[in-house]
């Protein structure tokens, strides 16, 4: 589910109680950033030029404005006072690319590799709903690459810097095929094809990673699933009658931004300061979910929940016990029902949905340690 930079769907309330200075002293977040009833209203950043603010305020349904906004704002967003952006990245080779896939869509990708020597393994990332690999994951990738791993990521069609209508998933299986197509090419690289390869999925990306595995049961050496969206929490799903009405509407208006949803940043980020920093994810999808997308996500989670026994690869599942976005009980069920002999479940007391972005620095480092230790063990490091 989208968790970064979300605004309230229901009320106007004060978001920032007092001015917070950018660590370089050049940018302020406005004293009061209001969550307007119309989802996705742009955040007003004080200290930026009028021209930059216009770029950030643009309608981002199409990819052009999203790419312009990210290019203009990336130095600011990647220097905020968040532990992920303090991760070392000297000694890393980073590359950004655009490539047209077999469906004719231009897909954005990025890689992070140790500058010297061969990586211990390759990690292929699947991001969450509404997200991009260009913001918080930048810090996650730096940490993993600094630990000796080659990290590869893409933005799904319709998300981040990839082509497609923003936030629209007409068919999750086509999206999964796009992911498989891209990462199959990564794994065929002559410098990488002999290395262990792991899937890394967060939230919706956990569901995508599982579907990739179910389509390629013998192609991966393991999967790391952080708060996987095997089931959307019951409190997040509209009542049955509303769901039936929305299902009917979706047949006629699948692209319509209409589905009611709670304030995701508040639900996903336990640390208040980090919750406020989520507004810097300026290309995240922040509007009400599109009708077709919402129903596709519900269909996908139901499908996965019915196939947990078919999951057979080594698993590391990490979930906050207080997650109100995706249901930790289904992570427990995945752990219990998966046919994998090699599986581990870590449940974190008092933690919310965004384990690597929205918890205390101490908890974020603890989760990183758990992930990297598991990777080292599975690479015989």
Image (cartoon, helix red, strand yellow):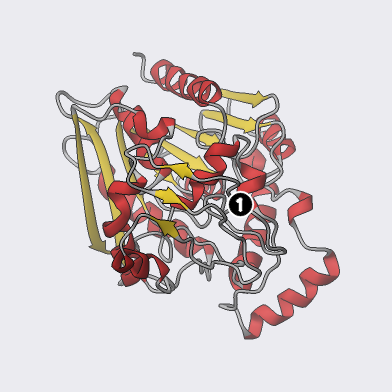
Viewer-nearest residue: 213 or 2:
2
Q: Is residue 261 visible?
A: yes
Mark 1 Cα within 10 Å, few/some/many (few <14, many 20+)?
some
Residue 49, how many percent across, how many down? Answer: 30, 62
Quick check: 318 left or right of 28?
right
**Residue 341 found in image quarter:** top right
Does 335 sit above or below residue 180?
Answer: above
Q: Residue furthest bottom?
A: 252
Quick check: 340 left or right of 67?
right
Residue 208, how many percent across, how many down? Answer: 51, 50
Residue at 59 percent of width and 78 percent of height: 256
Residue at 58 percent of width and 31 percent of height: 317
The C terminus, quarter of image: top left
Q: Is residue 184 visible?
A: no
Quick check: 56 left or right of 370?
left
Does 11 sit above or below residue 94?
Answer: below
Residue 254, how many percent across, how many down? Answer: 59, 78
Residue at 61 percent of width and 83 percent of height: 253
Circle 1 residue: 15
**Residue 308 found in image quarter:** top right
- Report the number of discs: 1
């Amino acid at each position: 589910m989208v968790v970064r930079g979300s605004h309230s769907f229901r009320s106007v309330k004060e978001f920032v109680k007092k001015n917070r200075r950018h660590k370089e002293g050049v940018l302020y977040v406005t004293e009061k950033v209001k969550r307007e009833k119309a989802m996705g209203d742009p955040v007003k950043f004080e200290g930026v030029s009028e021209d930059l603010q216009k770029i950030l305020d643009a309608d981002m349904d199409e990819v052009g404005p999203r790419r312009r906004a990210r290019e203009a704002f990336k130095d600011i967003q990647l220097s905020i006072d968040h532990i992920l952006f303090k991760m070392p990245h000297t000694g890393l080779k980073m590359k950004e690319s655009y490539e047209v896939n077999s469906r004719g869509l231009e897909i954005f990708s990025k890689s992070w590799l140790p500058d010297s020597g061969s990586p211990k393994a390759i990690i292929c990332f699947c991001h969450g709903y509404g997200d991009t690999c260009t913001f918080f994951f930048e810090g996650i990738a730096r940490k993993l690459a600094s630990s000796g791993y080659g990290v590869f990521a893409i933005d799904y069609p319709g998300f981040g810097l990839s082509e497609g209508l923003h936030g629209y998933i007409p068919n999750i299986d086509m999206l999964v095929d796009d992911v498989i197509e891209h990462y199959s090419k990564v794994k065929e690289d002559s410098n990488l094809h002999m290395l262990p390869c792991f899937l890394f999925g967060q939230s919706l990306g956990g569901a995508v990673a599982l579907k990739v595995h179910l389509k390629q049961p013998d192609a991966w050496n393991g999967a790391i699933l952080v708060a996987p969206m095997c089931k959307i929490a019951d409190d997040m799903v509209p009542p049955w009658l509303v769901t039936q009405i929305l299902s009917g509407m979706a047949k006629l208006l699948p692209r319509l931004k209409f589905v009611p949803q709670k304030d995701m940043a508040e639900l996903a980020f336990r640390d208040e300061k980090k919750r406020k920093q989520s507004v810097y994810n300026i290309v995240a999808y922040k509007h009400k979910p599109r009708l077709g997308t919402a129903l596709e996500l519900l269909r996908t989670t139901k499908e996965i929940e019915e196939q947990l026994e078919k999951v057979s690869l080594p698993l590391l599942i990490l979930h906050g016990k207080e997650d109100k976005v995706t249901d930790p009980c289904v992570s427990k069920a995945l752990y219990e029902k998966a046919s994998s002999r090699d599986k581990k479940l870590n449940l974190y007391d008092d933690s919310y949905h965004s384990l690597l972005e929205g918890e205390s620095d101490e908890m974020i480092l603890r989760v990183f340690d758990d992930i990297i230790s598991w990777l080292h063990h599975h690479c015989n490091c």
